[in-house]
Amino acid sequence: MSLSRLSLFLFPALLGLPLHAEDLRTVTIRTPAGQMKYDLSVITAAPGSQLKLVFENLDEMPHNFVLCRPLPDKADKGLELAQLAWQLGAVGMEKAWIPDSPRVLAHTGMVAPHQQESLVIKVPDQPGSYPYVCTFPGHAMAMNGELRVVQQGPRFTALDYQLFLGDWQALPDFAALTPHRRGPIPDRLLTIELEGLTQHFALRYDATLEVPADGEYTFFLASDDGSALSIDGQSLIKHDGIHPASEVRSQKVALKAGTHPVRLDYFESTGEEQLYLAWSGPSFSETPLSRWVHPSRVPGAQDKAPQDDFTGIPLAPANGEAIIYRNFITETSPRGIAVGYPNGVNLCFDADQMAPSLFWQGAFMDAKRHWTGRGEGAQPPLGYNVLHIAPPGPALAFLPDPAAPWPAKTARAAALHFKGYHLDAKRFPTFRYQIGPVAVEESYQPEGTAAQNNLHFTRTLRCQAPAGTPTLHLRAAAGSLRPDPTGWAGPGFHVAAPSAFLRGEELLLPLAFPQGSATATLTYHWTP
Amino acid sequence: MRFLLPSLLFAAAAAHAADPTESDYYPIQNIPNPANLVLETGAITHTPDGRVFAATRRGDVFQILNPLAPDIAQAKLSLFASGLHECLGLAWKKDSLYVTQRPEVTRLVDEDGDGRADLFETVSDAWGISGDYHEYAFGSEFDRDGNLWVALCLTGSFGSSVDYRGWALRVTPEGKTLPTVCGVRSPGGIGFNAVGDAFYTDNQGPWNGSSSLKWLKPGSFAGHPGGNDWFKLTQEIGPRPPDPHDNSRMVTERQRVPTLVPPAAMLPHARVGQSPTAIECDTTRGKFGPFHNQLFVSDQCYSNITRVSLEMVNGVYQGVAIPFLENFTSGIIGMTLTPDGHLFAGGSDRGWGSRGGKPYNLDRVAWTGKTPFEILDMKAAPDGFTLHFTAPVNPAAASNPASYAMEAWTWAYRAEYGGPEVDQLRPAITAAQVSPDRLSVKLRVAPLTKGHVHYLKSPGVLSGDGLHLLHQDAYYTLNEIPGA
């Protein structure tokens, strides 16, 4: 077989599959940036086992992990418990949003952005579905999942092997051979790794199985090369000859409660070697009887991600520097330049109309759309609290008269010329462009913190123009705007723009050039 | 389980162990990438002082440190810039790196000397982008007059929804952008020949029966009328040419459309490649082997390089395409050849699969110093072709017309996607005359057909040392018959 042996042996360990209820299993669950989800929607565990859970918060906001008892009468995905957390109100923060409820089985604290926490969970003895949820107010609708407690069957009660050396093309007549070595296998799981042999050997295993109750049981067998299984001296599955372990053969058999002798014969010629045996019954799901777990077989249900689109290519600023992503971005011309700043605020500058098209908080951009396949379509921001301070169109215009309508679009070649940008030491860009005779440098300083709930941008435009250039107008914001003592309140934002005036739904700021230069400084806050 | 297949393969390889292969002359080495950077190479360039830069489809620009070190393990990658939009052109001039990215040509300068660019200055963005992924912009190096050329893919395969899609533009040193050639479909790269004329590769599709290497003669029409509406924006190259007739032939339409320039070298589809990209002229004067002044043309799909030798006949370029080097690990998109004879080549298979099989690559090829036995070039003559070889031939074998075979065909010139090979002929090779120095052979061929590719196979030709040609196939595009 050409598959790497190493990768196959590592496979169950990588997936964190429950090899047996006695093993302490580690599962890592993450909250990817800006997606308001856990990366696992199902975690599987054996009743009564111990589960070590590592919770990694990759998001820009705090999250927790709370494992709940199910409601007796309905599957609520933990939402009822999250509602209790929400009702904690002001004291919720102190209690890490963990309500006093008998439903709480285990929980982390509130885990800050880019931090992690581990806890060891005693898995309930009762099989069933146990919801887990983030109880930070507002998160539970999207951030929930299910711990599936699945009953595992018993493993062998005794297991002995006989090892034979020889070059066979099919199972040999074991009775006519003298074993090279024989003995018990202490963990009572089938293994072919006995002497580090990789070719030219055969094994006969004799085991006893304690069947818990009368009923129909199914055995599953896969091997590379040949193998044969018999129970109570009756042949059940035979897959002789030289072949890979890709095919799992199964066979049902009715068994009485009590002890049954099981015999498995196996041989390996050359190349790869594998052996998988498992069983399932009326009271338990497929349970391995071998140390190696076949990659296609997962006992019970598999831990799984909710959907494939989960594996994006999230981009994030690093090292205290801004990150730039030029591509097709929603609600922006195809000449979009998105900038992610290190304190969790982002913007997109439209290098066609020379205007900021989007401000948002949280995660920056997911590049998967453009960096896989041909890269079709426009990508929305990855974060939240997306603001449109004005509809698409130019931010600057020469108005022929004070009542002239704001232009929907300015022809680039005629009046607007993008000149590029310059990066400062933190790689924050200053955009440069020309509108008519006016050269503009436009920059944004991200200020405030999420914790203090005062994130905002300070936007600065420095303009140079020949003296006598007519007044240029900046559309600082547009929409439903109300004046307040410090500026104007718009939908989701507040803008402070000294010397601006409201013209209908447009907040305009005049830039006059009596001396040939003009500067405008504006601040944009997010508001609830 | 037994390994039967590998042992059989081994036996087959052993039987021919003595035959030279491409890698005996031009081994391909991978630039070390221990950090697993996503090197979806879109363009590569070098500087006069021996620096090498590679730009990627993801918008990063890397400098290759120690690019020319004899031990490639010494080469390292250093991030110079990021955040650009699908880089498909790189050029260097006076301490600045010029990147052609989807929306513009941008000058990158590392002002503070920390190894990363700080200034991203827009040099030209005088074309439209509508948000269609197909609207790629391929940029050249600087030509002799200091112009940087940009070839603009159509919107999709057939049309042109925004300014100058389907054109090639020149950005002058003064920053003017001059519409220069119309009729472009889906370019894959731009380069210059030894005398400084510009060429680009165009991909099989509408009005392109096969992929080809085309001359960007200023003022010309390259064959696809999809972008010709933009004559309404410019008088730079005169009036709009008449549209070609559908389901015609290139030789026929050249009579009707005076500015239509035929492809300089067809790169026969599914024979030498399927998606030609970069063009690099060998000006190393022998540092990269015997192919001085010839063009290397890479192919994204076939992950290979084809060699093209051109001549000018009756005012148009034409010439021969010969396989050169294959087995790159991904689809080549960018190349550069340093004066000391290191060819850097890299690419990606994203969106369009490639034979290489890896998602991306950045490789270096150096010549071992051994000269392969090859057809050096093939020139048209009034009554046949003259072959030049890289080493003396065995005169008995090379003078036997049965050592050769020829087929000829052209492609339908039509609006429909791609085109079948049509008008097939089997020209007869009636004589093969070896020169006294045994370095060339004059083939007498009849008939010669204007506008046809003449495909020469030379399985019987042997070198003086008894070697077969390393590549026995040669495809000559006969736009004009000399003396005719």
Image (spheres, rainbow, N blue to C red):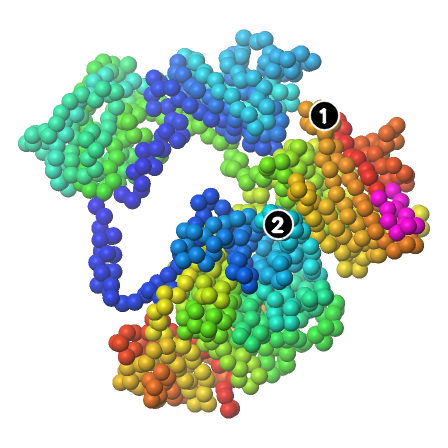
Is residue B131 in sight in this rendering? no
> What type is the residue that disc 2 sits on?
Gly
Q: Residues within 10 Å of mark 1 (few under 14, many from 20)?
A: few
Residues A126 and B121: in front is B121
Horizontal placement of A196 versus B376: left or right? left
Which chain is disc 2 placed on?
Answer: B
- Most foreground residue, B325 or A463: A463
Q: Which residue was labeled with disc 1? A: A453
B285 or A213, which is in the foreground?
B285
Q: Is residue A513 magenta?
A: yes
Q: Quadrant of the N terminus of chain B?
A: top left
User: What separation in Å lies between label 2 and label 1 (alpha carbons)?
Assistant: 38 Å
Magenta residue span: A509-519
x, y percent for residue A56: 52, 26
Location of residue A344 in the rendering, given as x and y in whole percent from the top left corner: 66, 33
Residue type at mark 1? Answer: Asn
**Residue located 67% across and 12% down the image:** A91
The residue located at (61%, 12%) in the rendering is A95
In the rendered image, which quarter is residue B178 located in? bottom right
Determine which residue is flagged by label 2. Answer: B113
Residue B288 visible in the displayed image: yes
